Amino acid sequence: MDMMSTLSDDLLLKILSSLPTKDVVSTMLLSKRWKFLWTMVPTLYFQNDFESSKDDYAKFRQHVYLFMVLHKSPVLETLKLRLGWHSTTDDITTWIKIAVARRVRKLKIHCYSDDDDIFLPSCLYTYNNLEVLKLGNSIVLDVPEDVRLPSLKTLHLLCVEFRNEESARRLLSGCPLLEEFVLDKSENVSPPCFYLEVPSLQRLSILDKYREGNDSDVKVVIKTPSLRYLNVVDKCDSGLLFLSENMPDMVVANVSVVYKNPEMLMTSFTSVKRLSLCLTTSVVSKTIKEPVYYCDLSSYYICSCAHYFLVGFSVQIQHRVEFNQLVHLELCASVEKWCELLNWMLESSPKLKVLKLKKPLWKSVPKLVYDDSYQNIDDVGRFSRFVDRSLILHEAPVETLHFKLTQKSLAVNDIGVWITIAVKCGVRDMSIEIDCSSSTTPVILPRSLYTGSRILVSLKLNSVTLKDVSSLPSFPALKTLSLASVKYPGEEFVRRLLSSCHVLEDLDVDQCVDDNVTIFTVKVPSLKSASLYKSAGRSTEGEDGFVIDAPSLEYLGIFFDPVGFCVIENDMPNLVTAAVSAAHSSPGVTLTSFTSAKRLFICLPYSKTEWLNLLMRLLNDSPNLRFLKLQEGIFQSLLVMSNLSQCHKIEGTRPCWNDPSSVPECLSSSLETLEWVGYQGSKEEKEVATFILRTGSCLKEVTIITPKSSDSDKKLEMLRELSLSARRSPTCQLVFD
């Protein structure tokens, strides 16, 4: 603030002019000097949120009236309005009249209306001092016959409507000094014919990108002899852009249009110095009978979108166009016969100094995603041909390659060829996802995937079949491996596959119903994260589970649906988080494997009395426990996050709750949060809850969440009983949900 106070008022006003007016007004609270400074700011900027209610807009309208009345600057340099859906013609008319009375020079209005169109007051069309006018969206221009804007130099019309074609003619004819005109007709077609005849115009931009349909009555006629800069992006008019033949001052022309007669365009740019063409067309209807000379052209770029135009155009007029001053040429070398086009350009450009051959961008992108369900591709062979051609023509290294294929298309038959090509391209991240809902025919991956992917870093497979190979798989750089619903040749193949991944860090396995593997063995010394899941519906005659030997694990998730076993062969001293879940008893899972975990999730079935024994064992063996969450589900479950010091196999059951002879260390020294989900108020639950409340010295918050189906009176009673229970911690908050 000290530095700001040293600035002059003029400089401060310039700074404040860049801020919304509501922020400018708030500066009046800073000091006496700032109390009235905001009233002299030459720019007023009012913005109403699009999501505001009618009541909010009413308050906003009152503020605008108040600020404009209190504003004291001799000249209102700029008024900017960005209004939401509740704006009205009456409001805008009032504000414009005030601005005109304050001799506004620049007026910018973008507004939306959900009811009626917005019309501008007639005084604006005959205002002498306006230099810049920018209008957008729900505004309709109904231009009177006496329109006169003698000072207007910049006019932007973005998606506005004209009342009729005559209004457009009147507006432009009433701007004798207009130098810059921007017209965005992407969302509006009124008027369909736009005649732009402005002798003074120097810069012109016309955009029409999104409007659907090809109305033959839509056209733009441009007669601007003083034009120096032209930018046209028009994907809708289908060749109905007409340019005046004489634009001797043209310096830059960027043209991207749908055009049936490109030779007409070429004759309009004979004086341009820098020309960029992107012409989408399939027909060359005429030939140029008279030679065309580009006497001043110094830079020329032809985009690859002009495929058909380049082929036809170069053949029909290649000896009738001369680029006598062209010194810089950029040519996209992706179209057919581009060499013929280049040869013609070289012969027609005697002063050429710089030649730049550009590759199409799609050949250089590092990530390729092929999805045959995109936009419901009906031609099943078309997709395969597209993938074949794009992979073969791709020139840059492929970092990422993803396939999302359905068996309805023929693409799955070609996946082996594509993988072979990708391996040769040095892909580092590969994902193959098959939708098997329409067919049970297996999609078999080629041998090249196992033997040639020496730089592959990430591999994700879904619903594919792996084929046994005589040689050992080799993935020396693979760090991430995801196997979902994959069918394997057998258990030995799985062991060889994982043993070939010497630097593997992340493993995600989701075993399907019939994958030929019952005992899934994971022996990977480098592995840091593993999520292992046995899906429902598996019917195995013998044992079904996981064998894990991964001493570097930091995360381990084991999920059985409904049943399975897990054998941990070695300690996991780096384990931070462990999760175990099963729908039925899983005798192979013991808590002794997770003694080093800091966060432990257990979801296992226990009887109504057995869980009490498990809970007390965990409390006694977790002296650093800070957060405890108990959850009642379909099966009696326990969710615990803790720092375990030791954990022994639980033997026997606790027939009922009895207060332990000694308070677990975590309750007296560390436990801060208890969350109980599904609390039903049974005798055992109430006794456990009151015991923790009574002995938890460090408790800060206890949250009790009851089932939604609980009887309201019963629920109220059991919550009242808990709220009256004694609490050891004076800061403990009891929260009910």
Image: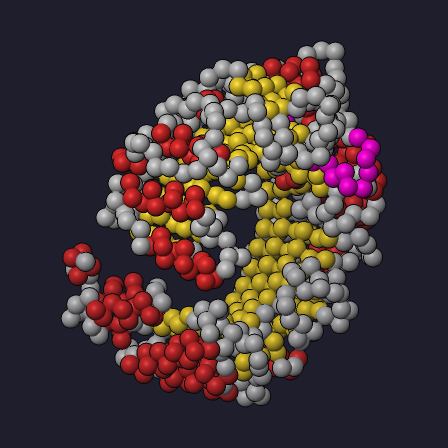
Residue at 61% in and 62% down? 207
Residue at 49% in and 72% down? 84
Asked if the stretch drawn in magenta spans residue 347, the answer is: no
Pick the front one: 696 or 258: 696
Residue at 27% in and 69% down? 26
Question: 615 left or right of 188?
Answer: left
**Tag count:** 0
Asked if the stretch drawn in magenta spans residue 430, the answer is: yes
Q: Quadrant of residue 429?
A: top right
The span shown in magenta is: 427-442
Using the rendered image of the protein, determine whether residue 54 is visible from the camera's viewpoint. Answer: yes
Using the rendered image of the protein, determine whether residue 80 is visible from the camera's viewpoint. Answer: no
Q: Given the current orientation, which residue lies at the most extreme top position?
A: 471
- Location of the C terminus (image quadrant): bottom left
Q: Quadrant of residue 665?
A: top left
Q: Given the current orientation, which residue lies at the most extreme front position?
A: 655
Q: Is residue 365 above or below residue 295?
A: above
Q: Is residue 50 above or below residue 621?
A: below
Q: Residue 56 at x, y = what percent?
A: 42, 75
- Location of the N terminus (image quadrant): bottom left
Q: Residue 354 at x, y = what percent?
A: 59, 38
Q: Residue 566 at x, y = what percent?
A: 57, 23
Q: Residue 328 at x, y = what percent?
A: 59, 42
Q: Is residue 638 above or below residue 89?
A: above
Residue at 56% in and 76% down? 114
Q: Is residue 448 above or below residue 131?
A: above
Pick the front one: 568 or 418: 568
